Amino acid sequence: MQERRSFYLLIAIMGVVALVTMFVTNMILYQVAFNEKEQSLVQTAQSQARLIEAMARYNRQTNRVDWETPVGERGPTSLLSKRAAADTISQLKDAHQHFPGFGETGEFVLAGIENENIVFLLRHRYDVSEEPDPIPLYSEYAEPTRRALLAQSGVMVGKDYRGVQVLAAYEPVDVLNFGIVAKVDMNEIRAPFIKGAIYTFFISMAMILFGSVLFRRITNPIINRIRESEHRYRSLVEEINEWVWAVNKEGVITYSSPYAKGLLGYDDQQVLGRKLIDLVDKQSKDNLPRGFQGHPTHIHAVNNIELLVNKSDGQSIVMELSAVPVFLQGRTFSGYRGVARDISERKQAEQLRNDYQHKLEQDVAERTAELHEINEELKNFTYIVSHDLRSPLVSIVGFSNEVKFDVESLLAELDIQSLSDITSERLESTIPESLGYINKAAEKMEGLITNILELSRLGQRSLELELVNSAEIVDKNIKALAYQLDKVELTIKELPELNTDELALEQIFGNLLGNAVKFLQPDRQGEISVWAERDQYCWHFFIKDNGRGIAEEDIEHIFEIFRRVGARNVAGEGMGLTYVQTLVRRLGGRIQCTSTLDKGATFSFSIPIISTESQRMI
Amino acid sequence: MSMKFNTIILVDDEPAHATLVERNLRREGFNKDIVKLERGQEVLDLIFGLGDYEHRTSPDFPLILLDLNMPGKSGMDVLKEIKSNVETSHIPIIVLTTSDDPAEIEQCYQLGCNAYIIKPVMPDEFREKMGELGKFLNLTSMPSCSTIVQVDAKLDDKEGDV
């Protein structure tokens, strides 16, 4: 509505300007016309006066002697003059009858004084030749005539004998003591200007009206566009969940979007006029650039600074604020504007996350320590078990040896013939046989203990990473098995160099190749192939044979300690695969097996690819 | 350092083992004194004349057959105390134990043991090893004893096979 008022005011100003211009122009033109009229009237009056004077003088001379009148009856010179005057007047009247006059109201008046009255001798107006009635010399009427009769000469605006305002030039007529007045009605002079003024007034009003309509026509779309775009931005600013604000160079808030309510709890009107820095909690005030405190020396844009802000209800929130300085005409600093949002929840989440992370790290550290402890315990356990298991074994073996010795001694000391069959059989075969079983069991037991010990030591050996050529290792193992591999069809593909522990890799290949050979089927041509594949993280090694294979239900048990699956006619401690698995795991890899019974087995294990860079970091 | 001795102090918390060792040594013809002790502390008391052994005279020339894994003072402690004392460091000590841990063997030699024997567990090995030990002790207990270097080397060789 502001715009509408402005628009009407604009039109009003235009109207006033037009009127003033019209008025001034008219006045000037009127003045000029008035002056011209004045001059022409003066000229007319003067020329008429001089003409009448000349006529009167001539009439007086020609009428000096009244030839027809007897001398005695001849009147005084005044009478003579009177006659001359009368002559002159009649001549004038005659002349004026053939004179069309000037203007509609223009008039030419000749008057004289008689008995303190102004007597009009000649009045030229239209066709009327009737002289008006005499008027007292001193009255408010006929001022110009009076002045002419009082021998004054000039021009004036005043009332004529009719009491009408006229412009009149007055001039005395010397010879006849008459006065002459040339006059025109003021109304006649003014009339064209009044008419002109009325015309111009209506024309300019019409023009203004037309102009306004045109103006509206042209500006309306522009205004609408501007309004629309403003509305768009305003609604954008007012509807987003961010506080949009502006401050002046003193840091006082000059604009605040309605979201101030959501963010700060204040109506946007409530924050207007307050300093933005006053909303910020003491401890984070320094985060605001000094430009906000009325120090125009440190003016720079800030991005996502975090401020602690007290809401209207006293609650504290973390506000993230971004601001850009505003420069008038690109030079004079005039304040900042920017956006702010509530990031309390995000901060809380971050805090929570940090807490969790901290807790997680702590947990991991604790668990690691626990694992470490358990590992230590396990080592001690293995040590103690092997010790303590061995100790009774020593006794078993030792005393079985004692018994054997005693039996041998008995046999030597006694006469075999004197013993009963049963006793001699006991001494000669039953007891030694029993002792044999005891020893065999002890031997087996010792084998198991040794394996446990070796496995536990395997976990303790420190690995040495170095560049290892797996092809060489396989070659070495094959040479060691040369005798058994004599009739086997071997396929060794290209094998890589990799960073790992050489001894461990050698043992892995040794065991797997050894197994492959060991479990070949004697009744068909043995085939063993070795190859390697690479992915992003690991080298995968494959050892495939066409041996007796492993039953599906057994595959999951093959890596278990002391487990021997399948046929029992091949010598072995049942430790190899457990061993291999431990080694592969220590190298950071995995081992698996796929197999079909009586068709063969494929063992594959992975070794992680360790770059020389990360190797240094280990 | 002389390896001459006239008494064997056999330290083992397992009486069965001590019995076995004694029997085997005797069978091999070893005829010197054998003192059997079950605790590490007892050996130290005997050697240094402390505690229960305060008023008893310790053997003039003892040789200690020492088990490692014992409750209380372990064989390792005993070895350390005897070998680190100037007055007793000359006493020959042969460690006779069940452990075949290389680290443990290494440690014993560092502490100054004269020989390290893993208690035989395999039947054939048992007889063989015991026989050798008996022969060795018979030899060294003689007044004119052979050099220890040779004997040690022989014992070391045996270990390598285990």
Image (cartoon, coloured by chain):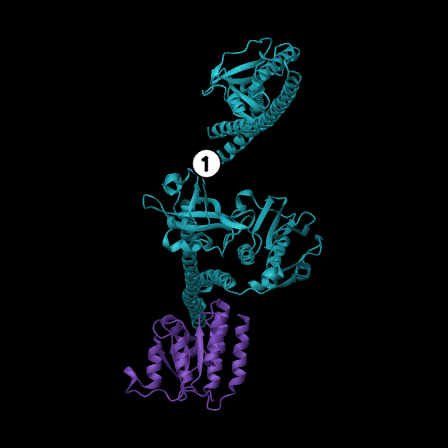
Q: Residues within 10 Å of mark 1 (few under 14, many from 20)?
A: some
**Residue B145 in picture, x, y percent from top left:** 49, 89
Q: Is residue A421 visible?
A: no
Image quadrant in which you'd find residue A111: top right
Letter of the chain shown purple in the rendering: B
* Residue at the (48%, 69%) spot, across then down: B101
**Residue B48 in picture, x, y percent from top left:** 34, 85
- Report the front residue among B21 and B44: B44
**Residue B146 in picture, x, y percent from top left:** 51, 88
Q: Tell me if A16 is positioned left or right of A94 in this view.
A: left
Q: Which residue is mark 1?
A: A238
SS for tag 1?
Answer: helix
- Report the front residue among A7 and A618: A7
Q: Is residue A411 above or below residue A266?
A: below
**Which three-letter amino acid code belongs to the residue tagged 1?**
Glu
Q: Please, which residue is most extreme toward the bottom here? A: B144
- Report the front residue among A539 and A245: A245
**Residue A616 in picture, x, y percent from top left:** 58, 64
Give the chain of mark 1: A
Q: Is residue A604 visible?
A: yes
Letter of the chain shown cyan in the rendering: A
Labels in figure, total: 1
